[in-house]
């Protein structure tokens, strides 16, 4: 179809507008488009902070502090705290008695760049009783029978994310920020369960399950941060089967609403200049 002689209604209308007015209509359209693009870019911007547990390695204290690093996006305003704490725990339950919970030493291990972090394991072997040296010092889930009394031990790691949640509440909406949990494995299959709650040492409410089917691999899960708050700021990871390592925790925060609503300074200057030029040229034409 030959469209060389076709004029759209919009184009036909513009043909009757003086050239100088059409040129400034183009300028204003360009400025509006630029402002929209900049606003869209601001809306798409986000910041990701990563807390890596790859180091230190070896036998650690019962509680270790880790400082997050910005791995994507812009720097954060001010000097916010990026430190969270990890604590090892072990619960002991004999028969139907209520479980006793005590702090336990953490253990960090580095196999390679993929497999590293805080070690957790599930085993049916009769590992030594608490207070004695574990074979590889990881936090274990296991059962031991002494004088026909079966005692179940569950070792797990809990993260205090109070500083992380405070950071998210100051820089973006907690309802849109996402938390990521990463684990890795030597052999597989492995299963980890994630919980959140308000009491140190206690798992709280079940949240997610992470599964690794093969060795020398890693997996992750993400969820909205809205389940955690200033009251419920503990994240607990327990071994369900196999042996795995908690690699890292990430926080991804979208750009705040205020950053999207306010146009960049350059766009404001450009808009003002275009409006002033339009006024001057209109006066000259008269």
Image (cartoon, rainbow, N blue to C red):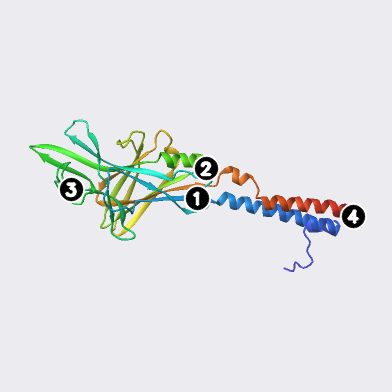
Q: Residue at x 27, y 57 (%)?
A: 186
Decide if residue 172 is in sight here.
no
Q: In x, y percent, where is residue 4?
A: 77, 68
Whether tag 4 and tag 2 are in contact, CB under 8 A, the answer is no
Does 83 sit left or right of 278 as displayed? left
Mark 3 falls on what kind of element?
A: loop
Distance of mark 1 from mark 4, alpha carbons?
A: 49 Å
Label 2: how many Cα within 10 Å (few below 14, some 14–19, many 20+): some
Within 10 Å of the Cα at label 4, are there few (<14), some (14-19), or many (20+) other Cα atoms? Answer: few
Tag 3 residue = 134
Seen at 81% across and 57% down, the residue is: 22
Instruction: Please report the residue visible at 72 percent of the width from the left and 56 percent of the height from the top.
Output: 30
Residue position marked by numbered label 1 in the rendering? 47
SS assignment at label 2: helix
Q: Local crowd at mark 1 within 10 Å, few (<14), some, or many (≥20)?
A: some
Between disc 3 and disc 4, whose residue precedes?
3
Between disc 3 and disc 4, the foreground one is 3
User: Which residue is tagged 4?
Assistant: 284
Q: Work out how far the residue at label 4 is from the one at label 2, CA to CA, in angstroms.
A: 49 Å
Among numbered discs 4 and 2, the one appearing first in the sequence: 2
Dots 1, 3 in contact, CB < 8 A: no
Q: Earlier in the sequence, mark 1 or mark 4?
A: 1
The circle on residue 171 is 2
Tell me which numbered mark, 2 or 1, is placed earlier along the sequence.
1
Q: Position of residue 235 (x, y in %)?
A: 36, 41
- Residue located farthest toward the left when viewing the structure as drawn: 147
């Amino acid at each position: 179809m030959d469209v060389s002689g076709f004029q759209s209604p919009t184009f036909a209308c513009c043909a009757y507008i003086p050239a100088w007015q059409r040129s400034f209509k183009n300028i204003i359209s360009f400025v509006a488009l630029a402002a929209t693009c900049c606003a869209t870019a601001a809306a798409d911007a986000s910041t990701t902070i990563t807390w890596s547990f790859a180091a230190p390695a070896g036998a650690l204290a019962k509680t270790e502090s880790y400082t997050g690093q910005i791995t994507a996006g812009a720097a954060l305003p001010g000097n916010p705290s990026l430190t969270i704490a990890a604590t090892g725990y072990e619960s002991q339950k004999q028969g139907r008695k209520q479980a006793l919970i005590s702090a336990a030493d953490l253990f960090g291990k580095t196999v390679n760049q993929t497999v590293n972090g805080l070690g957790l394991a599930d085993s049916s072997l009769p590992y030594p009783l608490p207070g004695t040296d574990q074979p590889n010092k990881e936090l274990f889930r296991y059962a031991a029978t002494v004088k026909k009394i079966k005692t179940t031990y569950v070792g797990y790691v809990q993260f205090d994310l109070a500083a992380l949640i405070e950071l998210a509440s100051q820089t973006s909406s907690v309802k849109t920020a996402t938390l990521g949990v990463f684990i890795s494995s030597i052999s597989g299959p492995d299963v980890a369960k994630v919980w959140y709650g308000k009491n140190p040492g206690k798992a709280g409410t079940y949240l997610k399950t992470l599964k690794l089917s093969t060795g020398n691999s890693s997996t992750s899960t993400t969820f909205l941060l809205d389940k955690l708050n200033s009251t419920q700021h503990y994240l607990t990871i327990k071994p369900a089967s196999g042996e795995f390592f908690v690699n890292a925790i990430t926080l991804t925060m979208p750009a705040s609403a205020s950053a999207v609503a306010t146009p960049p300074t350059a766009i404001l200057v450009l808009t003002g200049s275009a409006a002033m030029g339009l006024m001057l040229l209109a006066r000259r034409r008269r």
